[in-house]
Amino acid sequence: MDCGVLRTLFRKRHASSSNGTKQPSVSSLRHADIPVVRFENGRRYHNRADVAYVLPTDDKEDDRVHQQHWLIKHAHGGNFHAPIHAQLDEGILVHDAGCGPGTWTLEMANDFPRSTFIGTDVSARFPETIKPRNCEFKVHNITYEGFFPENYFNFIHQRLLVMGILEKDWEKVIKEHVRTLAPGGWIECMEFAFHRAHNAGPHNDTLVRAYQAMCKAKGLFAEIPDHLEEMFRRAGLVNIEVKEVYGPMDQETEYGRLAWEDFREAFIALKPLIVKMNPELNGDETYQKFLEDCLKEFTELGTAQIGYRIWGQKPGDINIQ
C-alpha cells in the first residue's frame, strides 16, 4: 500500500476513535494519581514511572510508526516469518504485544478474517471504533504479569520495544509470553540492531554512543537483539530461527529515502536525550546540520541498519515456573 494512503487511512481511524470510551486494564490504573503524559519541545511523552518508553506518544510519532511498518514489511518480505500461515487462515488467537497505534494488528486482522487479534499497549493510541470485527485493543503494560490466562494465545508478536522495556524486565516479559502461549504456539520478536549498523562511519558512531549511553542511563537494553536467542532458549522455546535484514538508507530508492526519513524523525524525537549526551550538538541548526552530515555519510559508505527477527515455538511439555 502507498505510504501516503497508509498515513491518511490511520489518521482517519485514529481521529474517528478520539471520542470513544477508553477501557484501561487493571495494570494501567495502578498509577492513576500520576500525570499520564508530559510535553517537551512541542512533543507528548509518557510520564508514568512504570512506563519505560522514551519516544513520543503523539500523532506525529504515530505517522512515523505507520510508515515504519511499511518499511519493515517490505524489507522482511511480509508481516511475520513463523510458520503459522495455515493456522491464521483457519482461525487462531493472536496477541500483538506493544502494538502502538495498531498498524500491524489492523492489517493482519484484515488479511486473516478467521483469526482474532488482540493488541495491547501502555496508551490508547489505537483506533477503538473503526476496526475489523476480529480485532480488539486493550491498554496494558506487558511488564505486568497475569493479565491474560495461561495457554491462551496461538501466536504472540512483539516488535521495536528496545526503547520500551527495561533491561531487567526483558526475561520476565518473554517468560510471561511463554506462559500465555498455548503449547505448539509461536512467539516472534523484531528489533533493530542499531548498535551494529553495516558500513557505519563516525557520524553514525556518534549517534550509537549517545543512544547506548541514553539506554544505559534509563535502564534500557540497547543490545537486546544480541541476547534474544538465548532468552528464548532459557524460556524453553524450541525450533528457534533468526533472520537479519540489511536496510540501506540511501537516496537512490524509495525504500532508502523513506528509511532515512524514519531514522531522521526518530532521532529528532530523541534530540533532548541525545543532546544531553552530546552538548556540542545543542541548537536546532547545529543538530539539523549534524543529521544532514549523517545522510551524506550513510550515502557515501552505503550504511545500512540491521533488522533482527527471531521466532520460536512452545513445546507441548513445557512447564513455566
Image (tube, grey):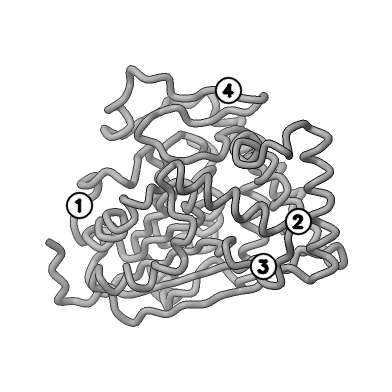
Is label 2 or label 3 in front?
A: 2
Q: Which residue shows up at 31% across the image and 51% down it?
A: 168
Q: CA distance from mark 3 to mark 1?
A: 34 Å
Classed neighbour count for the residue bearing mark 4: other residues with Cα under 10 Å, few (<14), some (14–19), many (≥20): few
Helix, strand or loop under label 3? helix
Task: Please state which amino acid type lies under the numbered disc 4.
Answer: Phe
Say what amino acid the circle numbered 1 marks. Answer: Pro
Q: Relative to 204, does residue 28 appear above or below in the rendering?
A: above
Disc 2 marks which residue? 260
Q: Could you say which is closer to the camera, residue 212 or residue 146?
A: 212
Residue 277 location, x and y as percent?
Answer: 60, 41
Q: Separation of disc 2 and disc 3 at Cα?
A: 15 Å
At numbered mark 4, what does the secondary structure look like: helix, strand or loop?
Answer: strand
Instruction: Please name the residue that numbered disc 1 is placed on.
Output: 149
Looking at the rendered structure, the kind of residue marked 3 is His
Q: CA distance from mark 4 to mark 2?
A: 26 Å
**Within 10 Å of the Cα at label 3, are there few (<14), some (14-19), or many (20+) other Cα atoms?**
few
**SS for dot 2:** helix
Query: x and y percent of residue 200 in the render?
Result: 70, 67
Callout 2 amino acid = Trp
Res. 131 in view: yes
- Ranked by sequence position, the earlier of labels 2 and 3 is 3
**Disc 4 marks which residue?**
39
Q: How many marks?
A: 4
Residue 91 position, x and y percent, is: 37, 66
Compared across the picture, whether 25 is left or right of 225 comes to: left
Q: Residue at x 48, y 31 (%)?
A: 46
Determine the secondary structure under disc 1. Answer: loop
Mark 4 or 2, nearer chain start: 4
